[in-house]
Amino acid sequence: MSESNLPDFIAYFLQPDHFDHPVEQVDLIQTHISYVLIAGDFVYKIKKPVDFGFLNFASLARRRHFCAQEVLLNRRLCPDIYLDSVAISRTDNGFSLHGDGEVVEYAVKMKKMPLDGMMPDVIKRGGVDRQTIDRIVDILVPFYEQAADGPEIRKFGSAEAVAVNVLENFEQTESFLDQGALSKEQFATVKAYAQTFLEQQDLFAQRARSRVKDCHGDLYSANICLAPDQVYIFDCIEFNERFRYCDVASDVAFLAMDLDYQGLGELSDYFIKRFIEKSGDDGLQTMLNFYKCYRAYVRGKIGLFTAHAPEVDDKTADAARQAAAKYFVLAEKYAGN
């Protein structure tokens, strides 16, 4: 997107001298739901006015609410990183992040984490080992022990509630069958496995009594920063409770699946082994393949959506399609175990 197509306040803050703290250059990163401005020692994340049904940022009031929620929820694991939700106001000279005037938008203000510590890059450098996994487990176990639960949260662990999340993936991918990433056979295998596993209502009910918590919801390497003196686990799901209120097994299965995907199966197994040892959650293993399969299929689905988005260039579409195919192979593998 060219600068002329950006919202006026985003274009304004692409200029380093428009901040009230030292900035040499401003980098803009876009996702389908956010603008992210990296400016000096800080990062500003602005939600786009989009409504995907499961995510609704369409109104300014909703964006204000979810900026505040993002700060509140992510402070559970990153209290020093998530600083505040700030108003972007229109002024006589342009815009201000802290001034008076008409509020046109809201942003989450964060401290910038060390970019060379982002876990996917550390993995590429061969820098993730058992000690790294131990550091992550040492943070996650007390996080889940202290995470909120209660009747309103536990109900999301029932087989019926989990089925809503799991089965909608098949509805959303059926139109993409046999187009280069997902075959009819893979689709049928994974769907049948999921439907059969979901019939174990007593197992889900048992897990819901003690293991369904207000979790992270998006626990994989892209949301982990391995700084020398600290592990930051950031960017939890704030926009939809049904994706965050889940079995702890679903959360940790995402990272385990991600390690499998990146060819780190031994570390994936070690992660689960250490987590069970430290948490005492022996029943997690019974849920692991089911939730790994679910997480792999979701990542494949996202790859399909990206590959078929009209605004995406051919190179990006091909990369997304290849990644999706790899995720669906992994989902099929889990379904066969």
Image (cartoon, rainbow, N blue to C red):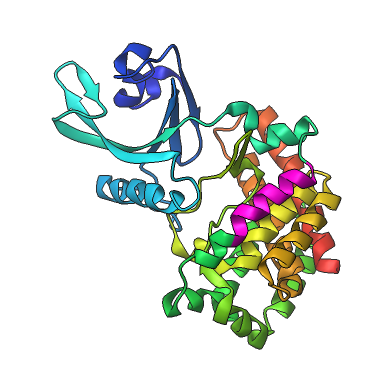
Task: Label the magenta part by its dominant secondary structure.
Answer: helix
Q: Residue at x 33, y 48 (%)?
A: 68
Considering only vertical position in the picture, is 114 above or below 160?
above
Q: Is residue 145 visible?
A: yes
Please provide percent x and percent y for residue 212.
55, 72
138 drawn magenta:
yes
Q: Residue at x 14, y 30 (%)?
A: 100
Q: Quadrant of residue 226?
A: top right
Please provide percent x and percent y for residue 180.
78, 46
Considering only vertical position in the picture, is 327 above or below 337?
above
- Give the side of residue 238 with respect to residue 212, left or right: left
Please provide percent x and percent y for residue 137.
67, 55
Asked whether 15 or 235 is in front, the reply is 235
Considering only vertical position in the picture, is 223 above or below 148?
above
Considering only vertical position in the picture, is 270 above or below 18?
below
- Write the start and end of the magenta stretch as one range: 129-141
Q: Residue at x 21, y 30 (%)?
A: 89
Quadrant assignment for the C terminus = bottom right
Q: Residue at x 55, y 68 (%)?
A: 246
Asked whether 138 or 263 is in front, the reply is 138
Q: Is residue 48 visible?
A: no
- Give the side of residue 57 with respect to residue 120, left or right: left
Please provide percent x and percent y for residue 158.
56, 80
Extreme bottom residue here?
202
